[in-house]
Amino acid sequence: MSLRILLPGICLFFLFFLFSNCQNDADPAAKITEGHKRMVAMLDSINRNADPMNYLHVNLRKIAYYEQLMQQKAGDEALLAQFNYADQLLRSGKNEAAIVQYQNLIQKIGDQLVDNTKMLYEMLALAYMRLGEQANCIETHSPESCILPIRGAGIYKLKAGPENAVKIYERILAQYPDDLLSRWLLNLAHMAMGQWPAGVPARYLFPADIFQAPPSDILFRDIAIPLGIDVQGISGSVCMEDFDNDGNLDLFMTSYGLGDQARYFHNNGDGTFSERTQEANLTGILSGLNAIHADYDNDGDRDIFILRGAWLYHGKHPNSLLRNNGDGTFTDVTIYAGLLSFNPTQTADWADYDGDGWLDLFVGNETYRPEEPNRCELFHNNGDGTFSNIAPQIGLAAWYGFPKAVVWGDINNDQRPDLYISNLVGDNLLLVNQGGTAPDKWSFQNMANNTSVQYPQNSFPAFFFDYNNDGFEDIFSTHFPVDYEGASVVPLLQEYTGKQPEGDWLRLYRNNGNSTFTDVHRELGLHTITFAMGNNFGDLDNDGWPDIYLGTGKPDLRALIPNRVFHNRNGTRFEDISMNGFSQIQKGHGVAFGDIDNDGDQDIYVVVGGAFEGDLGHNILYENPGNSNHWLTLFVEGVKSNRDAIGARVRVNVRQPDGGTRAIRTTVGTGGSFGANSLRQEIGLGDATEIESVEIQWPRPGVPNSTFTGLQMDAAYRLKEGATAAEPVALKRIVFKK
């Protein structure tokens, strides 16, 4: 093992023990301040000292290595080094240079398109595609850029890239007519030039109906550009929340690169945003593929947890707990809080598993080699600003795998949260909370096999939600291929051409109300392939039924497929409305729903960008166009329960136009497993004529339910545990500058 590989770990642990020894006698405030500095130093050390050969997303630094290797090798080894050099140029966004290298390689082999050289031609065509995407979608992007079907301002003005790509794809397809991926990219190239479908040879044309939007009033539009929140970057996540309690939802976002700065945008409430990353004391808080938020210390403002090291065998990186100081600043309290560990992860979730009124944290760590397991952690909140990992004491550390989603939900309505783990490399787990006599004497029982929710194999995003409003939480989980760096999105392309491939692609498990589940994805119209990564749910049209947004893709630059949106039709089926303006083909990751303009309907922020340094995208804010349905916004506040009331079950009883009644249900939380919704409960009421009552089941055994009456529709209220009346909340409607 080289000294270069060892250096990052040596630096980190030297810093850790140095500061630990120096600060043992310091007062808590000094320890917290010093801990923040230590975290910044650790993250900087990881970035500066990382061996690029150990990281799939450190591409610029690999270029020099392969360039030098080209000079040192001869024959086939030199050709391989040159191919890898060209590949890293492409992954780094240096598309013109990559084109030169691929062309040079083709000249060296004598311009022979055969099985062994086909990849060269595919990569040259891709480099031209990327050149066009870079010049049009990235450097001069518009609200319609890279959204299928590409039209209007999304059509490329600079066409050299796709024009050259078309020539190569047609040559490939003339010899390999069954190459679905090349055929798909040929269609996209023509579409980008405004030449689809007429310009595509009939034998290569994809069916027009896959690009047709169903009749719908749900037509969102990206408004991030004029607001200055169309952040450019690679994959990452977003938390949408009112972090300073001024009544307006702000945005906190992360990015996957080792040196990528976390960023914080303040909603000014006047139709503008201001970046306050530096003012918020976040400078030096780097990297992170995912983030979630909650009020872990019950002080009335939301804190943020950042997850790092995902997908990386050498991703022994620390996570970060950012304490909200209530004055517009954050402090990294990871070390002081006892949360410092070095495991690769992108998934965690908050819940009060033992009902003591304090939020606990489960972290799902990824294991790459069974002989070197990275155990999952359950951090019990001690109620004093610190946590203790009690997973070993209660048996949760015995299991290890490759969790890509961990989500809490209450499957049996006993006010004790249960845990669902979506596992990329085996069966999923459903850990049902059995209770206990003390935090470290708790018990969870894996009931996945008993309840038939262990599938799909190789799953990624997941969440609990009550899709049919029957009062029992259901489970949504989707498949993701384990060859996550490969280009094959062919199964989806086969589906587009009418050939449904075999595979366990998606599951929607309906909770039967007796601790069993039934997979209903087929009968509800969800038998489809998504390649989903980011995910969340919310109510797009205020009809009272939760809808689904999935960010999609794979790391490979050829994996250009649309993000997916499914509209819930009264709990009886889901309709694919992706082509209603949501079908961004750049990689979709963190997703957050929230009423960011306080007008009563939910908007959506999506982090866009891939895994490689050059696979850049611009983040999107989809503004909800509004609808005629009614709404209700609730701020649910615990007292004996955790302050955010995470896990509380909300039931809104409304009167219908026909005189009947209807119950609409939500659960307090941030939603899906990749991206974090606002903790406000923004509830669509459909065509209700009045609210009869709102009932809250608090997330703590022994706390009686609350019932509130007298609430008006199209208004906001605070519902506090133990209170007898709802407190009106005035939210100022925001008109965004466009």
Image: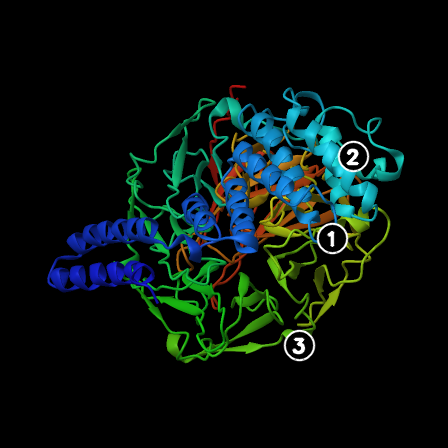
Return the x and y of residue 265 as percentages of the image width and height. 41, 33
Whether tag 2 and tag 1 are in contact, CB under 8 A, the answer is no
Label 2 vs label 1, nearer the camera: 1
Would you name the residue on which mark 3 appears? 449
Return the x and y of residue 40 as percentages of the image width and height. 27, 49
Would you name the residue on which mark 2 appears? 213
Whether tag 1 and tag 3 are in contact, CB under 8 A, the answer is no
Q: Which kind of residue does numbered mark 3 sit on?
A: Asn
Label 2 vs label 3, nearer the camera: 2
Mark 2 to mark 3 CA distance (whole Å): 39 Å
Q: Residue furthest right?
A: 202
In this picture, residue 208 sits left or right of residue 486: right
Mark 1 to mark 3 CA distance (whole Å): 44 Å
For residue 170, what is the image quadrant?
A: top right
Task: Looking at the image, tell me whether mark 1 or mark 3 is earlier in sequence order.
Answer: 1
Q: Which kind of residue does numbered mark 2 sit on?
A: Ala
Badge 3 element: helix
Would you name the residue on which mark 1 appears? 115
Return the x and y of residue 611 as percentages of the image width and height. 52, 47
> 105 above or below 156?
below
Task: Looking at the image, tell me whether mark 2 or mark 1 is earlier in sequence order.
Answer: 1
Task: Looking at the image, tell me whether mark 2 or mark 3 is earlier in sequence order.
Answer: 2
Mark 2 to mark 1 CA distance (whole Å): 38 Å
Q: Quadrant of the N terminus?
A: bottom left
At label 2, counting other C-alpha atoms closer than 10 Å, the crowd grade (few under 14, some 14-19, many 20 or more) is some
Camera-nearest residue between 111 and 596: 111
In this picture, residue 169 sits left or right of residue 446: right
Residue 130, numbered label? none
Camera-nearest residue between 115 and 40: 115
For residue 273, what is the image quadrant?
A: top left
